[in-house]
Amino acid sequence: MMLFCEPSEGGNIGTSERELREERLERVYGATSEDELTEAYDEWAADYEGDMLSLGYMVPSVAAGFIGRHVPPGGKFLDAGVGTGILGDTLRVLGYTNLTGIDLSERMMDIARKKGAYENLRKMTLGETLDFPDDSFDAAFSIGVFTEGHAPPESLDELVRVVKSGGWMVFGVREDVYENGGFREKMDSFEADGKWSLVEKSVAFTTFPAVKQSHGYRMFAYRVS
Ligand SMILES: C[S@@+](CC[C@H](N)C(=O)[O-])C[C@H]1O[C@@H](n2cnc3c(N)ncnc32)[C@H](O)[C@@H]1O
């Protein structure tokens, strides 16, 4: 599956470089098991930020805007699917200093660890039971994770469990995965069951403005009941 079309007008990434980045992205989206996905991220870790940021990966900026708009700093926060910690790097500047990160990939978290933005970084799998007591966090954030072949909608059950009543969940979901991957149903059922209330949903945006991408993405902010 090709994730990207030709570069948009004005794009300045060389073809072979772009192809290499595209191949690395395709590998993670094409993983068919948790082990394969973990291995793909472990091997990508050293190049991940260079690839994503040079393609103009704008999800962390939108997430930081949503978090700053809704979530008071000063609490205890979970970054689920923390990766190399791009989000935490920004959040600590904004006063969100008590951050815990979880991820499948130890190599990705090794890079996050070096930044010093996270109090704790632990290997855990979204979609399985998380090793945190109920109501552990004031908010949970997750970006770049609710996408093809990554974490399933059931991840949200555990994230809601570990966030306190009155706390926040701010996360992004790829548009096609929201519609066809069970996220819309799960998110609507939480609203119907009174588990959370939608406070803000972004317009659909392109995750990589430097290239024409075939999928849109949206950010959501929910208040946990
Ligand atoms: C595209 S990266 C996003 C990383 C970071 N949030 C960012 O925006 O740069 C996806 C991350 O989610 C992790 N991941 C994928 N599926 C996961 C799962 N089921 N449980 C925990 N982590 C997962 C991967 O290891 C990877 O670090």
Image: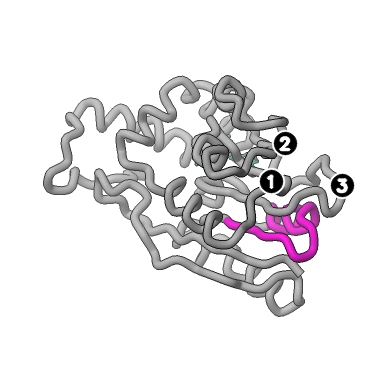
Q: What's the amino acid at mark 1?
A: Phe
How did the renderer colour the structure?
Answer: one colour
Q: Position of residue 174 (x, y in %)?
A: 47, 56
Q: What's the amino acid at mark 3?
A: Pro
Instruction: List the single residue furthest toward the bottom.
Output: 192
Q: Which residue is mark 3?
A: 133
Mark 3 or 1, closer to the camera: 1
Left or right of 190: which side holds 134? right
Q: Position of residue 168 (x, y in %)?
A: 67, 60
Q: Which residue is mark 1?
A: 77
> Which residue appears at 28% of the width and 49% of the height?
209
Residue 101 quadrant = top right
Measure how far apart labels 1 and 2 are at the Cα level.
Answer: 16 Å
Quadrant where the N terminus is found in the figure: top left
Is residue 149 among the parts visible in the rendering? no
Measure how far apart labels 2 and 3 are at the Cα level.
Answer: 14 Å
Q: Is the C-beta of the residue carrying label 2 under 8 Å from the nearest atom of ligand 1?
A: yes
Instruction: List the single residue furthest toward the right.
Output: 133
| Residue placed most toward the observer, 81 or 34 | 81
> Which residue appears at 63% of the width and 24% of the height?
106
Judge whether 35 appears above or below 142 on screen: above
| Residue 21 tag number | none
Measure how far apart labels 3 and 1 are at the Cα level.
Answer: 14 Å
